[in-house]
Image (spheres, rainbow, N blue to C red):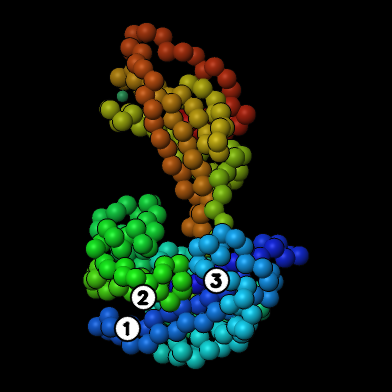
């Protein structure tokens, strides 16, 4: 499935309003057996933004005769049917926008017509050993994977659905599918909608103090923290020293709250070496939080 949407500013905030839905259905052998395409007349912002018009070539005129989302979704639902299924899309923004639009029209339970979800982008990138943290666009990926793009205009919902299906059909294996398919249940959407954030306050009770202790990358000894924490760009920095080999590091701690809880990531930068017989600099400042200070020492 692929969607096109237009940024709508409403009284209750910004919202990505769907203006086109495209989808193809694949059978077990990855053949396209049916297609769905329709424009959706926007109700919140009638005017299509310039950037969207340039990208999709969808005009205000085109949308005039289209049905609204509620009617179109009924047709989509009939096309999907009630059997088991798995939605494929390039990335997770389409499923997220579909969810938002259903929520907007108080139809959120309708989302469960989709039984499973597979991010075709992640699966395809994994198949070509492209790091999953890298976001490769559909057209760029198709070129990399030598999947024919043809003459079809991209950034139109049906054409992008077809191209996603061709990339997926070429690269999917049963093993990869098992890894990337997710049950599209309530928890799936809760996780999708969870807004991750970085902890700035070191006295937050979610912090695990022992996580600040860091082993020397060279000899494995727990290092002594020499300074208090300085918070910069949502990360917490402090200097550490290994009392065995004398190496000193600047360590940044990133404390991110995700749906699954606290994610504590560290990155070490070596800043020199003070021999064991030399005096290491004294603690230069006290952390505002004694518990963190004590735990790390
Ligand atoms: Zn060491």
Q: Which quadrant holds the N terminus?
A: bottom left
Instruction: Classify 265 as above or below 95.
Output: above
Q: Is residue 254 left or right of residue 286?
A: left
Whole-percent x, y for residue 211 in the image: 45, 40
Work out whether mark 1 precedes mark 3 in sequence or the reverse, and give the earlier one.
1
Q: Which residue in the structure is indicated by mark 1?
A: 32
Which of the pair 138/30 is nearer the observer?
A: 138
Q: Quadrant of ligand 1?
A: top left
Tell me the SS state at disc 2: helix
**Of discs 1 and 3, which sits in the foreground?**
3
| Residue 152 in view of the camera | yes
**Proximity of marks 3 and 2: CB atoms separated by less than 8 Å:** no
Q: Which residue in the structure is indicated by mark 2?
A: 162
How far apart marks 1 and 2 lie (CA) works out to 8 Å
How far apart marks 1 and 3 lie (CA) works out to 25 Å
Q: Which residue in the structure is indicated by mark 3?
A: 58
**Of discs 3 and 2, which sits in the foreground?**
3
Work out whether mark 1 precedes mark 2 in sequence or the reverse, and give the earlier one.
1
How dense is the environment of label 1, judged by Cα within 10 Å: few (below 14), some, or many (20 and up)? Answer: some
Q: Is residue 123 left or right of residue 53?
A: left
**Proximity of marks 1 and 2: CB atoms separated by less than 8 Å:** yes
Whole-percent x, y for residue 96 in the image: 52, 68
Res 289 → quadrant: top right
At horizontal 51% and vertical 47% (from top left) the residue drawn is 256
Res 265 → quadrant: top left
Whole-percent x, y for residue 24 in the image: 39, 81
Work out whether mark 3 precedes mark 2 in sequence or the reverse, and give the earlier one.
3
Instruction: Classify 74 as above or below 182.
Output: below
How far apart marks 3 and 2 lie (CA) works out to 18 Å
At horizontal 46% and vertical 13% (from top left) the residue drawn is 281
| Residue 187 in view of the camera | no
Q: Is residue 218 left or right of residue 50?
A: left
């Amino acid at each position: 499935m692929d969607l096109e949407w237009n940024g709508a500013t409403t009284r209750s905030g910004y919202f990505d309003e769907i203006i086109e839905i495209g989808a193809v259905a694949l059978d077990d052998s990855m053949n396209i057996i049916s297609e769905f395409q329709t424009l959706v007349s926007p109700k919140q912002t009638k005017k299509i933004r310039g950037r969207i018009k340039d990208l999709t070539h969808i005009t205000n005129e085109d949308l005039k005769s289209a049905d609204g989302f509620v009617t179109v979704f009924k047709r989509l639902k009939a096309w999907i049917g009630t059997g088991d299924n798995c939605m494929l899309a390039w990335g997770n923004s389409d499923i997220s926008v579909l969810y938002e639009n259903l929520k907007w029209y108080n139809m959120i339970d309708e989302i469960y017509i989709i039984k499973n979800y597979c991010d075709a982008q992640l699966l395809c990138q994994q198949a070509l050993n492209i790091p999953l943290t890298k976001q490769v666009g559909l057209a760029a990926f198709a070129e990399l994977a030598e999947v024919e793009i043809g003459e079809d205009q991209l950034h139109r919902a049906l054409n992008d659905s077809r191209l996603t299906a061709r990339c997926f059909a070429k690269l999917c294996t049963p093993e990869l599918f098992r890894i990337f398919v997710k049950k599209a249940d309530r928890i799936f959407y809760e996780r999708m909608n969870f807004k991750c954030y970085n902890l700035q306050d070191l006295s937050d009770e979610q912090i695990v103090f022992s996580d600040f202790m860091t082993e020397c990358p060279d000899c494995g000894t727990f290092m002594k923290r020499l300074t208090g924490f300085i918070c910069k760009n949502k990360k917490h920095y402090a200097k550490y020293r290994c009392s065995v080999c004398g190496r000193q590091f600047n360590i940044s701690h990133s404390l991110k709250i995700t749906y699954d809880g606290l994610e504590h990531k560290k990155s070490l930068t070596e800043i020199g070496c003070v021999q064991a017989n030399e005096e290491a600099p004294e603690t230069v400042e006290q952390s505002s939080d004694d518990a963190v200070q004590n735990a790390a020492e």
